[in-house]
């Protein structure tokens, strides 16, 4: 009786398939899965929260900060403006309030002190946004996909300007 070896002289398992071929197939499969997980839109994967499926529909009131902006950015954002995801027609909400404050820049003085000084040509813009969203497990989700945590950066577009803003506070009222 002839004894069969696990690997033959050419590196094939039981003389049938190469170990290198198996490793190549596994690497390609892992890369394909990784690319799918990285680039698949959240809305297409079915992972977005919806009211009644782990979350409750809610009206979100969030205050965002645009720090160190030029005056023309503040002029381009008006109360009543509709906000959209960049490059899409997905309505996120409306600007319901806006205020500006002098931008305080941190700088060193000649004697070595670090102080905050106002700048003439920059402002901090605070906007209040009302949006439909979902609340689940104490977390707010904008349009069911983007979690809103303090200091989260969210990108918006209006008819005239696109910008990113940092979330400072968010409250909600359950509507459904």
Image (tube, rainbow, N blue to C red):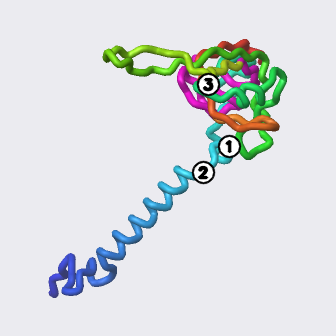
The residue under the point 43% across, 21% down is: 107
In the image, residue 46 sits, relative to residue 83, either above or below, namely below
Give coordinates of residue 103: x percent, y percent.
58, 19
Residue ID at (72%, 25%): 74
Would residue 7 be found to the left or right of residue 129 on screen? left
Mark 2 and mark 3 lie on one chain; the one further toward the N terminus is 2
- Secondary structure category for the residue under label 3: strand
Closer to viewer: mark 2 or mark 3? 3
**Which numbered tag is attached to residue 53?**
none
Q: Which is nearer the N-term, disc 1 or disc 3? A: 1
What residue does disc 1 label? 43
Dot 1 and dot 3 residues touching (CB under 8 Å)? no
Q: Are marks 2 and 3 in contact (CB under 8 Å)?
A: no
Give the magenta-colored segment's residue range.
128-154
> In this orientation, which residue lies closer to the viewer: 140 or 93?
93
**Residue 32 at x, y percent in the picture:** 50, 61
Q: Which residue is mark 2?
A: 40
Q: Is residue 9 above or below residue 137?
A: below
* Picture coordinates of residue 110, whole percent (x, y): 35, 19
Mark 2 element type = loop
Asked whether the residues under the numbered discs 1 and 2 touch, taking CB atoms below 8 Å apart as contact, a structural biologist would say no
């Amino acid at each position: 009786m002839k004894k069969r070896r696990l690997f033959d002289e050419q590196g094939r398992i039981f003389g049938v398939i190469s170990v290198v071929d198996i490793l190549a197939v596994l690497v390609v499969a892992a890369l394909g899965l990784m690319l799918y997980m990285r680039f698949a839109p959240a809305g297409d994967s079915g992972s977005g929260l919806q009211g009644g499926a782990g979350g409750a529909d809610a009206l979100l009131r969030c205050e965002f900060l645009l720090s160190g902006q030029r005056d023309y950015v503040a002029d381009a954002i008006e109360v009543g403006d509709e906000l959209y995801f960049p490059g899409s027609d997905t309505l996120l909400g409306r600007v319901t309030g806006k205020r500006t404050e002098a931008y305080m820049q941190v700088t060193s003085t000649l004697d070595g002190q670090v102080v905050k000084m106002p700048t003439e040509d920059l402002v901090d813009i605070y906007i209040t946004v009302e949006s439909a969203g979902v609340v689940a497990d104490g977390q707010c989700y904008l349009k069911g996909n983007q979690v809103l945590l303090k200091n989260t950066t969210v990108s918006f577009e209006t008819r005239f300007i696109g910008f990113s803003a940092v979330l400072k506070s968010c409250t909600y009222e359950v509507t459904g």
